[in-house]
């Protein structure tokens, strides 16, 4: 009798129409080839196959989209959208790959991974980090003097961009 390796990757290949909520607490290599509607929360690698149609909010670690997906996507590690993919929904991921020919409709927010320095500050956190008044931060952001972006009508600041800005300002 063959012994199974404990590190052997779990593979699940779904070629059916399904509806509901799927949650995977353990890493799995999941490939959806049929129709799925609902919500999907995975660990490991998720592939939306070329012939798949997914109408769901999707959360996962590594996600590859070859087919059609309508719904928001949160990829904790990486999202790859291949050439035949059609994505309608907002995307949040630290690493995004998009092949020529892919269709994307929605907002994309690329946040740094937790293991990187690229943390995102709000105005108060940045004021503490730079040891200046909040009013200075607001003035700099409003005038475009400091690298910033708006999220829900609030200024946000990527630490990596702030550190680069500080280094550049020191050389002036």
Image (cartoon, grey):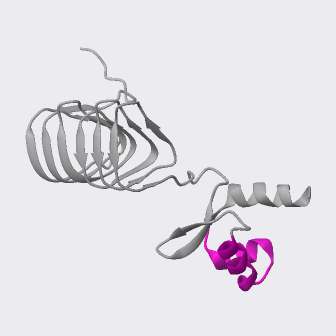
Instruction: Establish if 84 lies above or below 172.
Output: above
Q: Residue at x 69, y 68 (%)?
A: 144
157 relative to 22 in the view: left or right: right
Q: Over which residues does the magenta segment extend? A: 121-143
Q: Is residue 117 magenta?
A: no
117 relative to 66 in the view: left or right: right
Residue 12 point in image, percent of width and height:
22, 33
What is the quadrant of residue 38 in the picture?
bottom left
The residue furthest front is: 143
Which is nearer the eye, 32 or 69? 69
Residue 160 point in image, percent of width and height:
69, 55
The residue furthest top is: 1
Q: Residue at x 75, y 81 (%)?
A: 136
Residue 148 point in image, percent of width and height:
63, 65
Instruction: Establish if 6 lies above or below 59.
Output: above
Residue 91 point in image, percent of width and height:
39, 52
| Quadrant of image for the C terminus | bottom right
Q: Residue at x 71, y 83 (%)?
A: 134
């Amino acid at each position: 009798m063959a012994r199974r390796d404990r590190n052997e990757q779990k593979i699940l290949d779904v070629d059916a129409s399904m509806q509901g909520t799927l949650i995977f607490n353990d890493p799995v290599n999941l490939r959806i080839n049929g129709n799925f509607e609902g919500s999907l929360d995975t660990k490991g690698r998720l592939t939306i196959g070329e012939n798949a149609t997914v109408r769901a909010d999707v959360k996962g670690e590594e996600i590859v989209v070859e087919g059609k997906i309508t719904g928001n996507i949160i990829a904790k590690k990486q999202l790859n959208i291949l050439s035949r993919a059609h994505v309608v929904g907002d995307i949040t991921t630290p690493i995004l790959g998009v092949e020529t020919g892919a269709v994307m409709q929605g907002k994309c927010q690329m946040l740094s991974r937790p293991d990187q320095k690229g943390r995102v500050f709000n105005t108060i956190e940045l004021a503490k980090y730079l040891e200046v008044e909040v009013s200075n931060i607001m003035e700099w952001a409003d005038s475009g003097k400091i690298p910033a972006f708006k999220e829900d009508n609030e200024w946000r600041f990527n630490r990596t961009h702030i550190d680069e800005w500080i280094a550049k300002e020191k050389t002036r």
